[in-house]
Structure formats: structure tokens, C-alpha cells
Image: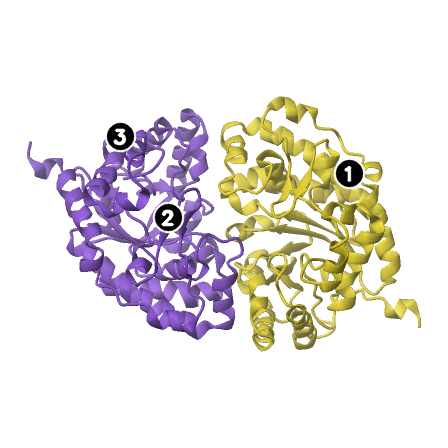
Chain colours: A purple, B yellow
Amino acid sequence: MNPKISENTLFIDACLKKPVERTPVWIMRQAGRYLPQYQAIRRNHDFMSMYKTPELAAEVTLQPVDVIGVDAAIIFSDILVVPEAMGMELQFVEGRGPVFPRPLREEAQVDKLLPVKAVEQLSFVMDAIALSRKNLAGRAPIIGFSGAPWTLATYMIEGSGSKNFTHIKQWRFARPELLHRLLDKITDAVIDYCRAQMAADAQAIQLFDSWAGILDEEGFTRFALPYARRIFQAIWEPEVPLIYFAKGAGGWLHHLRECGAQVIGLDWTVDLHRARQVLGNATVIQGNLDPTALYAPPETIRRLVRDMLTTAGQNPRHVANLGHGILPDIPVEHAREFVNAVKEESPRFHIRGL
Amino acid sequence: MNPKISENTLFIDACLKKPVERTPVWIMRQAGRYLPQYQAIRRNHDFMSMYKTPELAAEVTLQPVDVIGVDAAIIFSDILVVPEAMGMELQFVEGRGPVFPRPLREEAQVDKLLPVKAVEQLSFVMDAIALSRKNLAGRAPIIGFSGAPWTLATYMIEGSGSKNFTHIKQWRFARPELLHRLLDKITDAVIDYCRAQMAADAQAIQLFDSWAGILDEEGFTRFALPYARRIFQAIWEPEVPLIYFAKGAGGWLHHLRECGAQVIGLDWTVDLHRARQVLGNATVIQGNLDPTALYAPPETIRRLVRDMLTTAGQNPRHVANLGHGILPDIPVEHAREFVNAVKEESPRFHIRGL
């Protein structure tokens, strides 16, 4: 078979606003626990070993392409590799998630954070990307990613999950200069890390700003958006789509138009029709079915996909996805129905050449 | 002193869009743990005993009026009294919050829920309201409240706090008819409860829809908003302000205009200037400083209050508040600075007679 013919460029084409025959689809956290094939590997390896071993990371990265048929693979990794490379000890505690045992609380700790040489320190990610790309053999493009600076700073200051985000908010309201210094350092590290992923042949980059929604609007425009924008400007290349997913930023869509990414990821609280009105036609939108909708029976999932595609509209400049990561207890056949429904229901929204 | 002259009608007047000399201010969860006077009582009584004993509830209700000088008192109670009156066993577990040991999971459990006779079953609330009003002697009006049906259903189905809200979302997507039946029953109970509070002389009613933001937009317009609206229509009286606080609904402000309440509570993610543009001039807005902003030093709090008042605009039809409940570790003097700053900075935004 001619590899040029078999290459699946649907996702990249849609991100670059080229005409496509149907809406591409992938799922955040698609390489994850809902897949029995993932669990089989996870039983013998802890989470950190999995993403630090390129062979394992690449294997897991490819699973959703093979098992549920998504149109893009996202490298299996964790957003906290950057803080770790900056010198922070990171632990994954079973049942509790990631923990920094010594979170940032003092100015001196910020000063001590190290610049990142991703090519050396995070070579396991680049090796996993290269290996994934080789093994994918064009069946799907590979997406690299990083945490956005605000979200990484939140983890680094809180140390673990949080209910009220007391510590980062104290910095936001009482120590803004120190917070800006920290965000600057993280931004430099993320730029280096994204460039290294692109050099390793990542074909798109997504920034996850998972904690954007804990901010107020002014805070978002001061502490989150400018740093994401600086990264996108620094790493911009015309053929590599950049995606900004700021969870909880649905009230501030008007600010996202100027974020510097071609693609805006949307959580499930945002109506796609309204997003299109606010973002204009120059932006590609990604998302956004409620991840818990995949608990519904397959026929309901198909109806909800149809609704999502309808709100995205005609010639939609849309990448289908969930509005957040897939949950670990979703049946595989429900995830597959989501993917199949997008593939089967979306062609009528695309008229070639328009 | 003439009691008519000393009566503080500022909050009610502002809610009813009468001209006022300054912006009124109160704080969600103002009768709470950040107050040493509250903690002194709490040391000798568990939380449930406090709200079920009218003398204690009334004492705690008045504390923030005396200690930090707010313009309205909200009755000290809990939103989960309604599910308890419907027949669900409720426990408060130290360090974990409220728990329903037998959450709703089966249709038969919904059928067994009882209609509520609030005047009898929740007489402790009405007694606390009457006693608070007597002891306030016009220094501040008293606000009654209830959880909104969607939020109460979430607690009743999840049984306790939740990360992904798996169970209520399964109902939302896979068993919508059953969920509507449950919401209907809760709505009837809340209507009865609100009417009883108004009969006991509550001077305003706030519905808390704390979990609105876990929904998608379509879900909000189907499972949350219509039930809140039905309540507001049923209990409407021209001189009793009704307040709807739907947390996380900042992306759907356009739907809130038709909710049937005169006052819309806003969380801190919503810019007040934008809220005014979307909601129009007929709506009074309430909120919305980030509760964590009260960690900042007093001079910063004052600046942030000034910013909030500025975005609310001239002749603002605004009730100052936080964007969610005050946190337990906020210093009392910071809460007082918030209140004082509103009192001192807001008169210039009000021009009498306009």
C-alpha cells in the first residue's frame, strides 16, 4: 500500500482550516484506564515508569488508535514532568494522584528553580514521540503537549489537589510579583519543552490550562492568558497546529480569540454555537461533549454527538472531542460509539471546497 | 430612638431597584467559622444542633451584623434540611461534611420520598427566623434560603461531595425522566419551605444552585433553570426580593435573565460589566469578589472592592457580596475591611434620584 495514500491527515487538515470530508475526533486522556489493554500494562508498571519508559509510553499512546479508532494520538505523559525537570521532587501516591512533597511556599524556592533542557532531561518524552510516530506509520498524527504555566504554578504551589486553592490564590492576590516571576520561569521551561517535542516530530501541540477556571476574569487575563500566548508565539510554525484548552474559561471566550493558537479547546459547559459567534470563523474549535455523557447508552451517545455536531454547524472548523478527559469507568464500547458516531454523522456537515 | 428611622432597609431597597445612597453588602456564609464568636458556640454544639436549636441559630445569625457590620442577615441553616424532611437520613461527619448514608440510586427510593410540611417539620427554621427578626430589631433584614432543586438532587443522588458527579450525571444522560420526577418532587417541597419562611417574616429568599456549573448548557436549561423558575413564580410577592445564585453559570448569563428572580447572584468568574451588558438594566446583580481575595492585605482588599464597584458601574443596581461563601481561615479584620470598603467607596457610584 502506498504510505502517502494511507496517511490520515484529517486532524491536521481540520486544525489548519483545510477542507475535510468529515469532522476528526480524538479524546482527551484517551490512553487511559478505561482501556483493558492499558490496564494490562498498568498492572505491571507504576504510572511514572510507564511514561518514563519510551517503549511503554509509545505502546499505550497507540492503543486508542487501534482500539477505538481515533484520528490523532496524544503522547502518553504527564503535565508535571516540567516542574520535575525544574528541580521539584514529584511522587505519584496510589489513590491520591500526583504530589509535590515540598510545594513552593517561599521566594527562595522560586529562585532555586532550574531552567529546563528538555532534550536532555525529558529525553524519554522525545524518544516516546519518535517511537510512536514510527509505529503509527501515518495512521494518525501525534500530538505533543504541556501544562500551561498558570496550571503548572497551581500544582507547584498547592502541592496536590485542592478544594479552595488557598495558596496559589494568596500569591495571586497578595504576592503578584512573585507569582509573575514564577510564571516567567515556567514559561521559559515550557517553550523549551514544546520546541523539543516539535523537533522530535510532534505534529501538533496542546497546552492544558486545567485550572484556568479557578481564576477571576482579570486574573485570567493577567496570570494565565499572557503566558500561554507567549508560548504560542515562541513555538509557532505554520504547519504545526497549536491548541489551547483553558478549562472553565467559558465566560471569557472573547479573550481566547487572541491567545495565539489556531485551535481553542472548549469544556462541556460552552455551547459550540455561542463559541462560534464569539470566536469568529478564523478559529478552529475543539470539544466538547460532557465526559459523563459516555455513561449513557450508545443510542443516547449517538444522539448527543448529533446534537454537538449540529451546534458546531455547517463547515464547522471543528475537532470533535470530549469537554475534559475520559473517565476511568466508561465502557470501551461507549467510547467507540462516540468515535464512530462522529465519523458517521459528521460528513453531512462538510461540503468539500466550501 | 424612633424605630422607623433606625431600620436598615438598604438591602431590600436595592433589591427592589429603589434609589439608595450606597451599595448594600453582605457575605455568603457570613455566619461561619471565620468568626471567633461562632467558634465559641461551635465548640459546645455540633453543627446540626446549632441550626436545629432556634436560640443558637438566631444568635449565630446576628453575629456578622454586630461584628463586621453587614447590611443583611441570612438565617443560619443548611440547604439539606429539605431532603431530610423528605425522608432521607442526614449525617454531618466531622471533617467530611454532610453525608446521606443511603443516597438515591433506585426508582423506588424516589417514589418513597415524602411531601414536605415545612411549618411542622422545619419549624426550627421558622422559629429561628422569627427570633432573629425580633432580636435584629430592624438593624438588618433577614434573608431566608433554600437549595435549588438541581443542587439538592445532586446531593441526594451522590450522597456526599463528589469529584466527577458520576451518579447524577448518569441520571442526567441515561435516566432523564426519573431525574425530572425527582426534581418535581423537590420543587414542590422547596416551594412549601420558602412560603413557610416568608410567612415567618423572612424579608428576602435566596436559592443556592451551587452545582449548576457541573452541567452543560442544555442540561442547565432543562434540569436546573426551569425548576428554579417554577419556585420563583410560585412564591413571588412584590416586596420580597428573590435571589438566584447559580454558581458556575457565567457562560449562560443570557438564560438567567428569565429566571424569575429580581436579583442574580454571580460567582467571581463573571465580570460585572459584562454581566450588566448581558442581563440588562432591569436585573439587580449580587456579588462577586473571589472569596480567596480576602487573604490579601487590607489595602489590597480595598483596591479590589473599588475595582468591583467600578465594573458594577454608575447607579449600579448592585448588592456587594463575595462570589461564593467566605472561607473559614479568613481573618475577621479582612472580612470587616471588605464590608467597610463597600460602605465607604460606594456612595460616589450612587446619585440619588437617578
Residue assigned mark 2: A92
> Mark 3 is on which residue type?
Val
Mark 3 surroundings: few (<14), some (14-19) or many (≥20) residues within 10 A: some
Snapshot quadrant of residue A316? top left
Which of the two marks, 3 or 1, is nearer to us in this view?
Answer: 3
User: In the image, residue A140 lies at what x, y percent?
Assistant: 20, 40
Q: Chain of mark 1?
A: B
Q: Quadrant of the C terminus of chain A?
A: top left
Which residue does the image show at 53% across and 27% down from the upper left?
A: B175
Q: Which residue is mark 3?
A: A67
Which residue is located at x 37 percent, y 67 percent? Answer: A183
Secondary structure at numbered mark 3? helix
Residue type, mark 1 in image: Asp
Q: Secondary structure at mark 1?
A: helix
Local SS, label 2: strand
Whether residue A76 is visible, yes or no, is: no
Crowd class of label 2 (few under 14; some 14 to 19; many from 20; radius 10 Å): few
The residue carrying mark 1 is B192
Q: CA distance from mark 2 to mark 3?
A: 27 Å
Q: Is residue B304 left or right of residue B129?
A: left
Query: Which mark is in front, 1 or 2?
Result: 2
Q: Farthest top residue?
A: B108
Q: Which mark is residue B213?
A: none
In the rendered view, tell whether residue B9 sits above or below residue B92. below
Residue B47: % across, % down: 72, 48
Mark toward the start of the polypeptide (2 vs 3): 3
